[in-house]
Amino acid sequence: MSTELSSHEILDREFLPVRAKILEIAASLDRMQRAPDDVAGDPRLQQLHTAINKLLAEDSDRAEQIQLLFSRPYQQQWRDALDITR
């Protein structure tokens, strides 16, 4: 029998791991900003900023939106496009 956790129980369980991930992201962004070259125009950095903004939204499908942000659009002929033989 499975019991659904309350929001408070989930927060208790997830707080420290989520906090560590946020600190890791902040440290990575700090290192990029302090590095001697400039990546401000890199589209990957824009993707990261977009993903962070999606995290702040109150939507219930944030994970899906962020996954789609970093995913390629589906192509019916993906095997041909990636030159994969069966």
Image: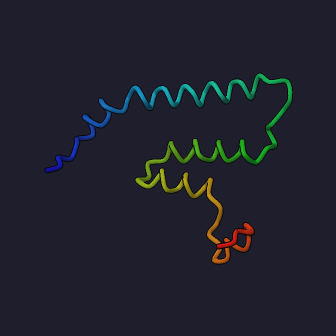
Q: Is residue 75 above or below residue 59?
A: below
In the rendered image, the residue lying farthest to the bottom is 76
Viewed as shown, does residue 10 lie left or right of 65? left
Residue shown at 79% from the left, 38% from the top: 40
In the rendered image, the residue lying farthest to the right is 37
Q: Quadrant of residue 24 in the image?
A: top right
Q: Quadrant of residue 11 in the image?
A: top left
Percent x, y for residue 25? 59, 31
Pick the residue in front: 57 or 80.
80
Give the number of marks.
0
Percent x, y for residue 50? 63, 47
Q: Is residue 50 above or below residue 35?
A: below
In the rendered image, the residue lying farthest to the left is 1
Residue shown at 62% from the left, 58% from the top: 71
Percent x, y for residue 16? 40, 26
The quarter of the image holding the C terminus is: bottom right
Pick the residue in front: 1 or 28.
1
Viewed as shown, does residue 14 lie left or right of 81? left
Pick the residue in front: 78 or 57.
78
Display coloring: rainbow
Percent x, y for residue 18? 44, 32
Viewed as shown, does residue 74 lie left or right of 18? right
Residue shown at 71% from the left, 45% from the top: 46
Residue shown at 55% from the left, 54% from the top: 67
